[in-house]
Image (tube, rainbow, N blue to C red):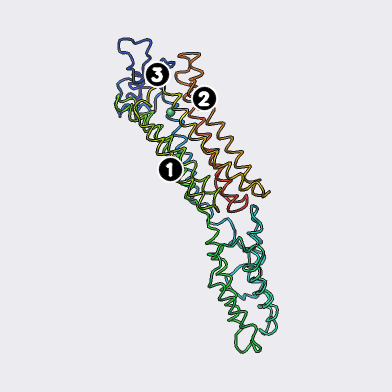
Amino acid sequence: RRQGGAAGGLLGKIRARVRGRGSELKSGVPRYLIFNQHILSGYRVNFTVRDSLYSLFTLHNESINIWTHVFGFVLFLVLAVALCWAPHTMLDVTQAGANETSAKEGGVVPGVKIEAPVTWAATPDAAALYTEPILLLQKARKRLGKALHLDEAKDNLRKILKDVEINLFRGKEKSKLQPAMIKTNFKKTLKFLQKELKKRNVGKALHVDEVRGKLLELETQLRAIITKNFKVEYWPMFVYLVGAMFCMASSSMAHTFSICSPKANMWWWRIDYVGIAVMISTSFCPVVYYVFLNEVVWRNFYLVLILALGSLVATVSLMERFQRDDYRFYRAFLFIAFGMFSIIPLIHAFFLHWKDPIDSQAFNRIIGYELMMGAQYLGGALVYATQFPECAFPGKFDLFFNSHQVFHVAIVLAAYTHYIAVVEAIEWRYGGPSAGIAL
Ligand SMILES: [Zn+2]
């Protein structure tokens, strides 16, 4: 036997106070502590907040319930921290192609490197729209580097600048350009350079270095436009991860401290149910945001609607009647119904994207993960409501593998599956499969 220090002795005492309700009728388990009729032992009776904290490190009928969601909390915390290092733009405009550095150009523009061609799997046309002008500008600089006199390169430069202009402002993809993307500064510099190069004795009016400077300026401006307009918004994902963390934390705390008193019991379970409502509401947020990225009105409509429905569900779950054990079917039904609401925006999005083969391919992957998530949630809720297997074998699953524990594991799995679905959505909207978000 362990005869360790004071802590060991204390845990031993705490352990000894965990009771079964069949054997000790005299000091029976209070009614409010019985959260499941088929669990006969492992109850913590007359535990203070401190005892409950210590009981984290002993085995009782809530141990697995607590630790499954502590694990979930840590998982989503790690994912949230990892997200801080996720790339701000999936369109890679800073990574240099090592074999094509400025050294090759005779150090024309020190410190500026030539990018490797960008792959943007989801919308290659949109990527080309911005990367091609950059490559053209780099070509122009290269051309100028080899020329001894500006007049030699002049015609070539003009042609390249024309191409840049066509690419950015007159191409058939023009409709995809948002007005904000067409930066007046960029256009001004481009026009100035074009005008100057048109002049007859260009070498006298404009120095080679000046042209180089202007070309570099154009490139910098274009890169700024790209970085700004293809900036990945991560806040909806953070909203979800924080919501999941709140759900996991409130659940594990409820399972730890709800046994302290009838009042604590009532309030902790309310907080637990609010946690589920928060989890479902925040799950919607990134999906709606990324799927309706370009349909701002619909996006805001769904986000506001979800906020309203989430508040309603949270309010209902604060009602006293809602806490009772025999209301577990209604609880399961309410949360499932709220979760099922996600089908509506997804069907809507399906009709927006099904025509485009690349979009629909990515969208189908998202739907696949969301269906998997749905199956995990539904499976968990079904087990939760039917209280299987302990209903068939009362007392046999008091400590391990009872319905509530299965339900907890299903929630963590479903929440993680949803995270993957959102990562898919981000990659679809902002970049290729090398998006670099932790999975
Ligand atoms: Zn629970």
Q: Which mark is residue 354?
A: none
Which quadrant would the C terminus be assigned to in this image? top right
In the image, ligand 1 is in what quadrant?
Answer: top left
Which quadrant would the N terminus be assigned to in this image? top left
On the image, which quarter does residue 5 sit in? top left
Nearer-the-camera pick, 354 or 192: 354
Can you give x and y, in whole percent of width and height, for residue 182 in the image?
56, 67
Can you give x and y, in whole percent of width and height, for residue 254 in the image?
37, 30
Relative to 128, does residue 156 appear above or below in the rendering? below
Instruction: Say which amino acid is labelled 2.
Output: Leu
Please give left or right for residue 213 compared with residue 154 in the image.
left
Q: Which residue is mark 1?
A: 307
> Which tag is nearer the camera, tag 2 or tag 1?
1
Q: Earlier in the sequence, mark 3 or mark 1?
A: 3
Gap in angstroms between the C-alphas marked 3 and 2:
24 Å
> Which tag is nearer the camera, tag 3 or tag 2?
2
Q: Which mark is residue 382?
A: 2
Q: Earlier in the sequence, mark 2 or mark 1?
A: 1
Nearer-the-camera pick, 143 or 267: 267
Nearer-the-camera pick, 301 or 425: 301
Q: Secondary structure at mark 1?
A: helix
Instruction: Say which amino acid is labelled 3.
Output: Gly
